[in-house]
Image (cartoon, helix red, strand yellow):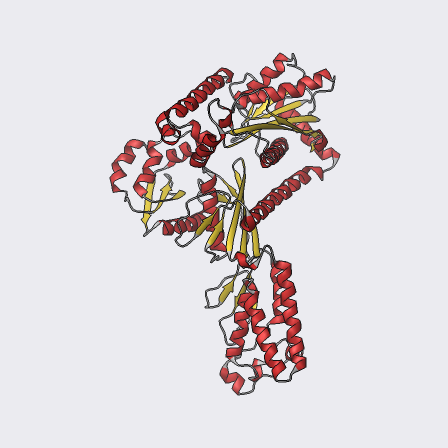
């Protein structure tokens, strides 16, 4: 749909909140979005100049627009999440999570049975969950069986059948695991009380269950039923031990949801901790693939909606690593700086980091577990596909890393015979480059690395991979040229988004078959340098190693830098502001200093870029 065609339908779009759907010329749903004002949001797609190729491609494919008006932003948020989950449009965030989760079902029948299931049937039964682990649910069921007496038989316990005496108690009754409703030895009211305790146990609310048993124990003691009172005391002790094992911080913390996010390229990992009365009752990490240029806030907002809906969260407080606008009314958003809530957020971040480490370890095992012959075959395929003069037994890969346009570092990974040799990995703090300049930074680290190898008369790799496009590749080549090392090795650039491979001086890229062993190996190397670089960068930040780039500007102090970052969130966004926008926050004189600094920086980037 062209901007001209869009202008003819613009006035037909409502200004109310709702969702909009984009269809291509084959009537396939390709994107779903939400908006405070449908007209304003949809218009932005046709009036903005997008720098991202994917957004440009989306707009080019739009042939038809449909919309649904809703009452408020919250309804739009929930509807968008539901439609994305149902239709999975190709340009929306892709949730890489297709598991069917287990539930506990409380059957809609007299004296309801409780059992594990993966299927939700609309038969009036009540479903608890879903849960992330079948093993944990089975363990919990066993724990419940030891503390709540519910039937496990499949008898049709209608009032008429019980009155006619059709059934006899079984072994479970004699073992004390059932109160014998089949013979009328237990009332439906008492059985319902047991179900209420079960629901509390499933939600982690152990206090009401313990309180119930304490009252029952005191009553037994008052009635001189000391053996029964002792059995109940053991149940209370069992519950308290279970509660102590599950404790995270303290029960005064309350009920809340905790979310953390970590991004690597177009892939985002979101961890969710469901906390009930200070106890973590559920943890889950999901993987999301970005299809457009979504911000961290947009990705996390989608994940929150999906996870809270999937796991039927009723928490009224959400703990987050950064601020965002959440449309649901009555929800408190907290970005903790210290204390128990901060500890929970750090625990969530620890979980998401562990999840990624496990994924990367499994990826490495895909090659590490192969025979030497299979490894060599992959290297021979890579030599053939890239027309290398020698088998790339020794491969080194470089990547720059910075945080929202700030704090540059770089990393290098070393692969020997197709598997990583972590003892040869290298980390680089950028020393000679002022500000954020990926090209100059890449030239610096490549020069430092191979100047050292040259001085030590050490063998060079058969292949060097620069994770970046033509600009970074040419910067690396300039570093090798100044060291008179051109011809000693082969160097290529790997474009981040499309997995295109560039050779120095070539105008056209090459694309390897997506399922080829050579491209799989390059992907593993790229993923490993991302992981290594991001971990190094994160550790440096956490130690306070970096100085805010804004503080490096002469005339701008720490307080001014902090005010700007708090207001605009990143140096990258600050760099894009006009003089007037900056002046409203820090005044004219400081705004001019900042603008002049970034203008001079742009000039430096222009001198270092290559066409």
Res 138 seen here: no
User: Looking at the image, is 150 positioned above or below residue 498?
Assistant: below
Question: Where does residue 225 sit, x and y in percent of width and height?
Answer: 65, 83
User: Looking at the image, is 383 positioned above or below residue 239?
Assistant: above
Q: Residue at x 60, y 78 (%)?
A: 218
- Which sits in the foreground, 452 or 159? 452
Q: Residue at x 68, y 40 (%)?
A: 365
Q: Quadrant of residue 424?
A: top right
User: Looking at the image, is 248 positioned above or below residue 361?
Assistant: below
Question: Where does residue 58 sit, x and y in percent of width and height?
Answer: 40, 35
- Which sits in the foreground, 142 or 200? 200
- Which sits in the foreground, 266 or 585? 585
Q: Quadrant of residue 47?
A: top left
Question: What is the number of callouts on the image?
Answer: 0
Question: Where does residue 507 sit, x and y in percent of width and height?
Answer: 51, 18
Question: Where does residue 569 sit, x and y in percent of width and height?
Answer: 45, 35
Res 55 seen here: yes
Residue 326 vs residue 427: left or right?
left
């Amino acid at each position: 749909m062209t901007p001209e065609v869009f202008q003819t339908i613009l006035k037909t779009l409502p200004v109310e909140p709702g969702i909009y759907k984009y269809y291509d010329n084959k009537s396939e749903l390709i994107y779903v979005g939400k908006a405070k004002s449908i007209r304003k949001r949809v218009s932005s797609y046709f009036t903005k100049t997008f720098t991202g190729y994917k957004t440009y491609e989306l707009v080019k494919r739009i042939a038809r627009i449909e919309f649904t008006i809703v009452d408020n932003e919250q309804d739009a948020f929930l509807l968008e999440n539901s439609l994305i989950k149902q239709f999975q449009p190709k340009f929306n965030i892709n949730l890489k999570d297709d598991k069917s989760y287990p539930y506990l079902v409380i059957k809609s029948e007299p004296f309801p049975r409780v059992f594990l299931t993966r299927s939700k049937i609309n038969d009036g039964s009540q479903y608890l969950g879903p849960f992330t682990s079948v093993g944990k649910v089975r363990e919990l069921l066993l724990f419940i069986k030891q503390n709540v007496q519910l039937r496990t038989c499949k008898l049709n316990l209608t009032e008429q059948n019980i009155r006619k005496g059709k059934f006899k108690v079984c072994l479970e009754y004699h073992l004390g695991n059932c109160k014998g409703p089949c013979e009328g030895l237990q009332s439906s009211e008492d059985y319902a009380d047991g179900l209420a305790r079960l629901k509390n146990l499933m939600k982690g609310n152990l206090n009401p269950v313990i309180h119930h048993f304490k009252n029952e124990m005191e009553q037994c003691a008052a009635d001189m039923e000391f053996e029964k009172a002792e059995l109940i005391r053991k149940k209370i002790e069992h519950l308290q031990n279970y509660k102590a094992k599950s404790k995270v911080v303290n029960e005064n913390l309350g009920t809340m949801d905790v979310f953390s996010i970590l991004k690597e390229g177009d892939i985002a990992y979101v961890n969710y901790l469901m906390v009930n009365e200070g106890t973590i009752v559920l943890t889950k990490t999901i993987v999301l693939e970005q299809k457009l240029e979504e911000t961290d806030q947009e990705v996390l907002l989608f994940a929150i909606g999906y996870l809270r809906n999937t796991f039927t969260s009723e928490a009224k407080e959400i703990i987050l690593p950064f601020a965002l606008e959440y449309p649901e009314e009555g929800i408190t958003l907290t970005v903790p700086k210290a204390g128990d809530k901060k500890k929970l957020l750090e625990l969530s971040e620890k979980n998401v980091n562990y999840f990624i480490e496990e994924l990367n370890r499994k990826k490495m095992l895909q090659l590490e577990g192969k025979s030497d012959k299979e490894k060599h075959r992959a290297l021979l395929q890579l030599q053939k596909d890239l027309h290398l003069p020698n088998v790339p037994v020794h491969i080194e890969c470089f990547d720059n890393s910075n945080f929202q346009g700030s704090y540059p570092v770089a990393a290098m990974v070393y692969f020997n015979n197709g598997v990583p040799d972590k003892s040869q990995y290298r980390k680089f703090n950028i020393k000679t480059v002022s500000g954020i300049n990926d090209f100059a930074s890449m030239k610096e680290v490549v020069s430092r690395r191979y100047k050292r190898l040259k001085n030590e008369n050490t063998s060079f790799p058969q292949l060097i991979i620069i994770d970046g496009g033509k600009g970074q590749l040419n910067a690396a080549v300039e570093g090798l040229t100044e060291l008179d090392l051109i011809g000693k090795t082969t160097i290529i650039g790997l474009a981040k988004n499309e997995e295109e491979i560039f050779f120095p001086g070539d105008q056209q890229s090459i694309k390897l078959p997506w399922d080829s062993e050579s491209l799989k190996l390059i992907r593993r190397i790229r993923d490993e340098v991302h992981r290594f670089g991001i971990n190094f960068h994160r550790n440096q930040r956490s130690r306070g190693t970096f100085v805010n780039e804004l503080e490096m500007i002469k005339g701008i102090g720490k307080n001014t830098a902090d005010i700007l970052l708090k207001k605009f969130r990143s140096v990258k966004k600050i760099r894009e502001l006009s003089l007037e926008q900056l002046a409203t926050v820090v005044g004219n004189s400081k705004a001019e200093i900042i603008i002049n600094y970034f203008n001079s920086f742009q000039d430096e980037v222009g001198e270092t870029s290559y066409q």
